[in-house]
Structure formats: C-alpha cells, structure tokens
Image (cartoon, rainbow, N blue to C red):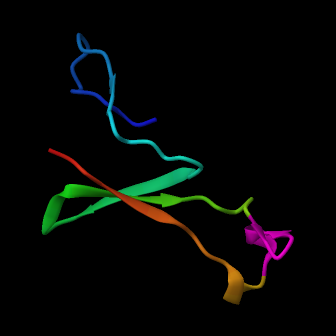
C-alpha cells in the first residue's frame, strides 16, 4: 500500500486509494520535472525467478526490473 502524509504532527497518514502494487516490491520512486502529477515506482525484483534462478543471480543480459506509474491529483 501507498500512504500519503501532510507532514503535520497532528495529521495521520492515509492510504492512497487505487495504489495497489500487486506483487511489485517498490524500492524507488521519482517524478519528472515536466510531469509532477505522475509518480513512477521501480520494483526490486532481485528475488524473482528468471530461467529458474533469482534475477539478481542471472546473467546481466537477462536481468530486468518492473515499473508502474501512478497519476496523482
């Protein structure tokens, strides 16, 4: 789940609805300067299997990562 928080001590974080990662393991997020309304998440897929081995142990030409984008309002 993804949470947002105002930064004020008196406010509690809240779940961002519609932000389901469904098997992704987010390890990084970023926005592009020219499109701050879209957050990009990169997944840590080191333990995902590729040809029977963990991605982090695979040949570099077979390593991959997944990413999703989330539009914010």
Write the residue at 44% across / 42% down. Answer: 20
Q: Is residue 50 magenta?
A: yes
Q: Is residue 15 magenta?
A: no
Q: Which residues are magenta?
A: 49-58
In the rendered image, the vertical position of residue 55 relative to residue 72, given as above or below = below
| Quadrant of the image containing the C terminus | top left
Q: Which residue occupies 23% across, 57% down?
A: 38
Q: Going 33% across and 59% down the picture, which residue do you hit?
A: 30
Q: Position of residue 61 (x, y in %)?
A: 68, 89
Q: Position of residue 45 (x, y in %)?
A: 64, 61
Q: Residue at x 57, y 50 (%)?
A: 25
* Left-right relation of 19 to 31: right
The image quadrant of residue 9 is top left
| Location of residue 7 with respect to 26 vertically, above or below | above
Q: How many numbered badges does the structure rendering display?
A: 0
Q: Residue 53's x, y, as percent?
A: 85, 70
- Picture coordinates of residue 2, whole percent (x, y): 40, 37
Q: Does residue 65 appear left or right of residue 46 in this picture?
A: left
* 67 left or right, relative to 59: left
Q: Residue furthest right?
A: 52
Quadrant of the image occupied by residue 8: top left
Say left or right for 37 vs 14. left
Judged from this view, the residue extending furthest toward the bottom is 61
């Amino acid at each position: 789940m993804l949470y947002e928080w105002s930064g004020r001590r008196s406010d509690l974080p809240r779940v961002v609805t519609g932000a389901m990662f469904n098997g992704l393991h987010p390890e990084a997020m970023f926005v592009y300067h020219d499109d701050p309304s879209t957050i990009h998440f990169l997944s840590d897929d080191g333990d995902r299997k590729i040809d029977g081995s963990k991605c982090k142990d695979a040949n570099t030409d077979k390593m991959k990562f997944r990413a999703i984008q989330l539009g914010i309002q």
